[in-house]
Image (cartoon, rainbow, N blue to C red):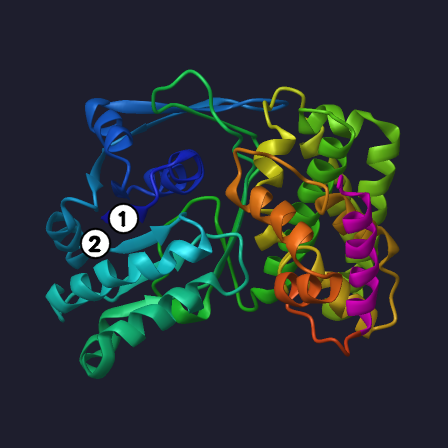
Amino acid sequence: MKAVHFGAGNIGRGFVGLLLHEGGYELVFSDVSASLVEAINSASSYTVHEVGEGGVDKEVTGFRAIDSSVDAEALVDEIATADVVTTAVGPTILKFVAPHIVAGLALRDPSLPPLQIMACENAIGATDQLREHVVELAGESWDALASRAVFANTAVDRIVPAQSGGGVDVTVEPFYEWAIERPPFGDTPPNIPGAHFVDDLEPYIERKLFTVNTGHATTAYFGAQAGIDRISDALSNHEIAAKVEAALEETSALLVEKHELDADVQGEYRATILRRFRNAALPDTVWRVGRQPLRKLSRHERFVGPAAEAVDRGLPVDALVSAMAAALEFSDAEDAQAVDLQRMLRELDAETFTAEVTGLDVEHPLYARIVEIVSARKAALPA
């Protein structure tokens, strides 16, 4: 069995690639970083170091890497004979993955089982997005290619911080969750130990996005606001911890009402997430977690998404709005979106900024709440 994975970074090696290896797949990583590809191809194995309570070291073997920017033909040949294709590249990069998949499907022997494709991204319906790109690129030839692939959405969860020390080893937390849509695969799902297959993925995706991602980003923005560097240290601050817990209580109320989740079970899940963030052995920073604030403040992301639905249902959102206000202060010269965020705050009026960044309609009840915090942030900016 063979799996092609787009994105040979820390998540690709330390989470998706690890589980695929444990499932018996030969791993082919695809990346555009020549130095990373060279480092992977120079290694016969790498180690995933789980740090924190219950963590162990796990060795990964049987892999190679291709630089897709200079050797697309080799990558397409690998896709044509693969069993599984996965991604961990970020939702905005999926459109660049699609051409390779289309080309691989065109070369694929029609007698082979369908290629099983899963986008493992922090986004709702990421695999659907990838499929749309593939179908659009294939055009009229899609009818002939459609039977050669199946697409399944997934929800993935593992904290993989920025790494230090170089090399291809990866440090991660012990916890992970990989939920995958069952129906697209019929009776032949991929063999991924530790993953679980579900009939309805939406509750899993939203529980993860609106608990893990909302909580993580909230911690990062309040931590940065307080001048704290590490995520675990930020949650050691009682005031910040209370603000994060309040935001997650609001998202939990939405999840319980919308998906009919058990409130006690969701409360336990929320507590587990906060314990994970407090893992002092994990060298995670507010700067890594807080990066790309414009994306995180967009319409269907971790703040505006749950807050808009909560308002529509008459649920409280004060803590989520406060978290968004903290996000507006996020400033990091090394993050392009953080730089753009501060520029837009200076250049745009509050109404235009709110509409462009959040995607909210002016008639939506959350719109005015966000205009208010944007106005306050603009007023606090130095002249």
Neighbourhood count class around disc 2 (C-alpha, 10 Å): few under 14, some 14–19, many 20 upward = many
Residue 36 falls in image quadrant: top left
One can see residue 184 in this view: yes
Q: Quadrant of the C terminus?
A: top right
Residue 342 position, x and y percent, is 64, 46
Q: Is residue 165 left or right of 75 when viewed as pictured?
A: right
Disc 2 to disc 1: CB gap under 8 Å: yes
Residue 59 position, x and y percent, is 36, 25
In the image shown, does 321 or 216 lie closer to the viewer? 321
SS of the residue at dot 2? loop
Question: Which amino acid type corresponds to the residue marked 1 in the rendered image?
Answer: Ala
Q: Is residue 131 above or below residue 62?
A: below
In the image shown, does 62 or 158 lie closer to the viewer? 158
Residue numbers of the magenta segment: 365-383
The residue wearing badge 2 is: 82
Q: Earlier in the sequence, mark 2 or mark 1?
A: 1
In the image shown, does 258 or 209 lie closer to the viewer? 209
SS of the residue at dot 1? strand
Question: Which amino acid type corresponds to the residue marked 2 in the rendered image?
Answer: Ala
Based on the picture, tell me whether residue 379 belongs to the magenta stretch: yes
Residue 291 position, x and y percent, is 57, 41
Residue at the (28%, 24%) spot, across then down? 45
Q: CA distance from mark 2 to mark 1?
A: 6 Å
The residue wearing badge 1 is: 3
Residue 209 falls in image quadrant: bottom right
Residue 229 position, x and y percent, is 67, 24
Q: Is residue 312 above or below residue 276?
A: below
Residue at the (32%, 48%) spot, across then down? 6
